[in-house]
Amino acid sequence: NAGVTQTPKFQVLKTGQSMTLQCAQDMNHNSMYWYRQDPGMGLRLIYYSASEGTTDKGEVPNGYNVSRLNKREFSLRLESAAPSQTSVYFCASSDPGAFFGPGTRLTVL
Amino acid sequence: SQQGEEDPQALSIQEGENATMNCSYKTSINNLQWYRQNSGRGLVHLILIRSNEREKHSGRLRVTLDTSKKSSSLLITASRAADTASYFCATVKPGTYKYIFGTGTRLKVLA
């Protein structure tokens, strides 16, 4: 039982490049989330998915897109990365307590 | 804006002392949860308290909830150096699945 897994763990992008962050959970949870955490700050909700086939915007959705591929997987895409998107990204699923992945450290130069 | 705001922002205590941190929120909630984050790691769920509960215990943790004041407190008794971490509260609004986190309390327990 791996819980919530995220790939990659680290990524460096140049401004304007695109990438997809992958997230998978094996706990059969319906709800999944993407958060970003900036230094010294709490987590801000980017997008969430209450169930397979649905996605909704969170507090800071601009510049991001998501796909709930199936019940297990929820991906986050940056179409044209900007330095302001440098952050640590966490995926989570809930039951209802949230279980978090280890995070992806993204740097946009 | 953040739904939850923790207070204090930082707390430094000696091992063996109790640590209390508070969370205030703005709207009605379904439940409130507390999480711990060790430096550079993901968040770990500690405890969930529902809106119709007033107090909950889990080991050395005690959480209270006052919905009339829109506030919650987390008490860690007999703190240990291993409790050094950031602690966040998260709220879930009724009818939604959105977890909104506060900015956290950084706790340092000195050996």
Image: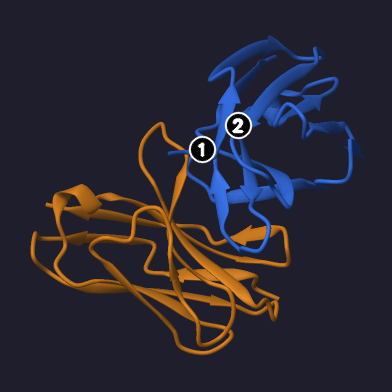
Chain colours: A orange, B blue
Query: Where does residue A34 sit, x and y in percent of width and height?
Result: 45, 63
**B104 above or below A52?**
above
| Relative vertical location of residue B77 with respect to residue A24 in this rendering, above or below | above
- Does residue B28 appear anywhere in the picture? yes
Q: What is the quadrant of the N terminus of chain A in the image?
A: bottom right
Q: Amino acid under label 1?
A: Ser
Of the pair A39 and B49, the residue shown nearer to us:
B49
* Residue at image point 73% right, 67% down: A95
| Residue A84 location (% of width, % of height) | 20, 48
Classify B92 as above or below A57.
above
Instruction: Choose between B18 and A82: the one closer to the eye.
Output: A82
Residue underneath mark 1: B39
Residue B77 quadrant: top right
- Distance between mark 2 and mark 1 Cα atoms: 7 Å
* Viewer-nearest residue: B65 or B75: B65
**Same chain, marks 2 and 1?**
yes
